[in-house]
Image (cartoon, helix red, strand yellow):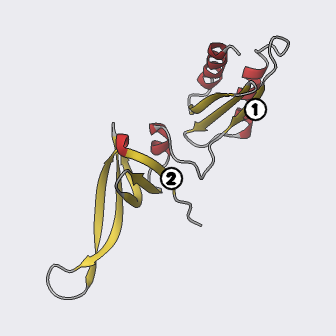
């Protein structure tokens, strides 16, 4: 399997629509190619078909048999690239690091970190009882082990 040719064909297809971006490209056993693409405002089915055809129609099945799967990311999968964070601004994320977990609204995506905000109940500094406080946490991207969009119905 000519992996460079597949990469070039994929990039050619992505270049036709600047709102689309690559999440993952895998070359698996038995000549299986798996492509995961996302878009700034989702990925319409016709774009998945267009990308698939651009790759498939430019590879020779007589030369090597292969299977191709082009898909958009599963909603339950962790965010992998910075552009996915930008796409999910103002949504609730569950973020895990090696030693902490956060759940909050994504309010900012910086060069190498994200900023979450959430409300928490804490004991009052003076007197009895609790009060609600706004928490803000800036989390460096390089320590995030998992970040998922929380689905709210």
Q: Residue at x 37, y 53 (%)?
A: 107
Q: Nearer the viewer, residue 17 or 84?
A: 84
Q: Quadrant of the C terminus?
A: bottom right
Could you tell me residue 69's position as x and y percent? 73, 33
* Residue indicated by mark 1: 49
Instruction: Kindly identify the residue that appears in the image at 63 percent across and 29 percent down.
Output: 26
Which element type, helix, strand or loop, lies under badge 1?
A: helix
> Mark 1, residues whose alpha carbon is within 10 Å: few (<14), some, or many (≥20)?
few
Looking at the image, residue 22 sits to the left or right of residue 146; the answer is right
Above or below for 10 versus 141 = above
The residue at the point 62 percent across, 14 percent down is 4
Q: Is residue 23 above or below residue 146?
A: above
Residue 43, picture quadrant = top right
- Residue 21 position by quadrant: top right
Q: Which mark is residue 148?
A: 2
Q: Residue at x 30, y 55 (%)?
A: 137
For residue 6, side relative to residue 60 (left or right): left
Q: At which x and y percent is residue 92?
A: 46, 59
Q: Nearer the viewer, residue 77 or 28?
A: 28
Within 10 angstroms of label 2, few (less than 14), some, or many (20 or more) residues?
A: some
Which of discs 1 and 2 lies nearer the camera? The answer is 2
Question: Whole-percent x and y of residue 9?
Answer: 66, 18
Tell me the number on the disc at residue 90: none
Q: Quadrant of residue 60?
A: top right
Residue 94 image point, x, y percent: 45, 57
């Amino acid at each position: 399997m000519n992996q460079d040719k597949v990469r070039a064909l994929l990039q050619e297809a992505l270049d036709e629509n600047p709102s689309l971006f690559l999440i993952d490209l895998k070359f698996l056993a038995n000549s299986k190619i798996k492509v995961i693409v996302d878009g700034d405002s989702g990925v319409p089915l016709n774009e998945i078909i267009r990308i698939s055809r651009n790759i498939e129609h430019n590879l020779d099945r007589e030369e090597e048999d292969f299977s191709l799967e082009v898909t958009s990311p599963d909603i339950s999968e962790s965010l992998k690239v910075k552009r996915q964070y930008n796409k999910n601004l103002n949504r609730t994320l569950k973020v895990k690091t090696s030693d902490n977990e956060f759940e909050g609204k994504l309010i900012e995506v910086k060069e190498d970190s994200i900023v979450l905000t959430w409300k928490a109940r804490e004991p009052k500094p003076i007197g009895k009882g609790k009060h609600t406080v706004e928490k803000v946490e800036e989390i460096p991207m390089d320590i995030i082990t998992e970040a998922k969009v929380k689905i709210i119905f």
